[in-house]
Image (cartoon, grey):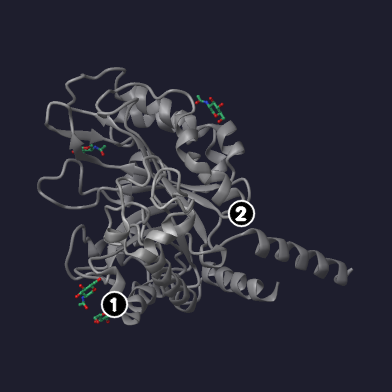
Amino acid sequence: MLLTSLLLAAAALASLASAQSVNEPEKGKLYLGAWLDTADSASGAGDGDRPTLAIKRMGYNLHAFQYAQNIPIDTYPFPIEQIEATGLDALVFLTVYPRPSPWNITDDQIANLTAICGKINKQGRRIVLRFGPEMNGPWNYYGQAPLKFIALWKRVFTALRRDAPATALVWAPSSGSGYPFGTPTAATLGQDEFNALDTNKDGAITAADDAYTPYYPGDDFVDWVGLSAYYYGPQYPWEDNVIPPAGTFEKLINVNGFYQNFAVAKNKPMLIAETAAAFHTNTPKGNGDGEFAVKQAFWRQYLTNATFLDQYERIKLISLFEFKKYEEKLSNGQDDLRDFRITNNSQILTAFMQDFAAVKSRYIESVPLSPSATLPSAIVPTTGTGSNKNAALGHSKAGVSFASLVALAGLLLQSVF
Ligand SMILES: *[C@@H]1O[C@H](CO)[C@@H](O)[C@H](O)[C@H]1NC(C)=O
Ligand SMILES: *[C@@H]1O[C@H](CO)[C@@H](O)[C@H](O)[C@H]1NC(C)=O
Ligand SMILES: *[C@@H]1O[C@H](CO)[C@@H](O)[C@H](O)[C@H]1NC(C)=O
Ligand SMILES: *[C@@H]1O[C@H](CO)[C@@H](O)[C@H](O)[C@H]1NC(C)=O
């Protein structure tokens, strides 16, 4: 009897250990999160937002909040206190850009970042860390240099495992649509990097080369995979407010076989790192089908679509892009003011929450973080955008949290099985 239950428990734990990555929600479940415009600039369109405010207006405890920062940590570490202010066990979704000199980042600078992650983990808060996103595009400091990128990645991975066991490292290239985004040459990239990217060995880097694999650090160095998926309109220039054709979202995550080759074949949890349908607020084409219809048609393709979520069960986190911002030019030469938000306008938000109700049980809502601990003073920023220090310090109960015990147990299991 005892032996049987021990064996059952061991089997259950073994399957858990083999099936799940760090911070992966259980089978059939996923998280909803958001990247909010938390900056406090005077000129921003919809900024000054906060996790506490988003939760309040949605009436729903989001499970992840995205922030971005550089490494080396320059002006400030991201404002963790804005997430702490919720009192919930929501994940930190931290996007980290290695810049401006990615190839001479030191081990101390990496340790500086991973020590912060470790402190946050010790309080019981989990992190998903998207390092060097869109490394396959030339527009980043670290772009299209796969050999150097992977070497840096492995140093970050090793330091995270040492310092921050409840932090998952997320590999998220740019969608391969449009790859290689120009005509990179051996002269601009260096011969070694060029050779690594010329996957079909025809002496040129073109759309026929693999847009993802050369940049992939390897199964043992990646916890989650991710992509961004925006809908800007039916064709370039992006200025038509037109309902997305059926299957638009599905197409985006399948560009160059991404979902199948990375989420399914490698059995990695996948996150949608940034996603929204853009409403072009000042386009010469006018309102077209209208903001509500465009946005609702898009979210119904995936976020609130039970059939879709069944079919794409390796998608484990979807992070809404809740910004209104200028991007690119309209055909009339003006800057395009795009409103990506679905939680700002009350008619749109109400309709979203109604659709969401049908799939709500699939999404794991965040719950009060317990037991909670004080915020270590080392990670409270002294300067910087969006700081709102005082809201954070609600609770002060010390102790090892359940989540960090779970993370520790997970690590032990991985080394046992
Ligand atoms: C919506 O955004 C505007 C700025 O674009 C802001 O002033 C307003 O407070 C926001 N409303 C909600 C409910 O978030
Ligand atoms: C960092 O590396 C770049 C080349 O990638 C070099 O130009 C620069 O001088 C280096 N910076 C420092 C501070 O070493
Ligand atoms: C990060 O680096 C700075 C400057 O070297 C140092 O003052 C700070 O204590 C470090 N923080 C952590 C958490 O290691
Ligand atoms: C929901 O998802 C399924 C499967 O991907 C798709 O066939 C269907 O068209 C979607 N529904 C909507 C309203 O987009």
Q: Residue at x 67, y 63 (%)?
A: 18
Q: Is 387 on the left or on the right of 334, as rendered?
A: right
Amino acid carrying mark 1 in the image: Ala
Ligand 3's quadrant is bottom left
Image quarter where the C terminus lies is bottom right
Disc 1 crowd rating (10 Å Cα; few below 14, some 14-19, many 20+) is: few
Q: Is 311 on the left or on the right of 170, as rendered?
A: right
The residue lying furthest to the front in this view is 203
Q: Position of residue 126 (x, y in %)?
A: 46, 64
Q: Position of residue 54 (x, y in %)?
A: 33, 45
The residue lying furthest to the left in this view is 42
Q: Provide the residue designation for mark 2.
A: 267
For mark 2, give the secondary structure: loop
Q: Position of residue 96 (x, y in %)?
A: 33, 62
Q: Residue at x 33, y 77 (%)?
A: 112
Q: Provide the residue designation for mark 1.
A: 378
The image shows residue 417, relative to residue 276, as above or below, that is below
Amino acid carrying mark 2 in the image: Asn
In terms of sequence position, does the residue under pointer 1 or pointer 2 come before the other?
2
Q: Tell me: is circle 1 under 8 Å from ligand 3.
A: yes
For mark 1, give the secondary structure: helix
Front in this rendered view, residue 398 or 287: 287
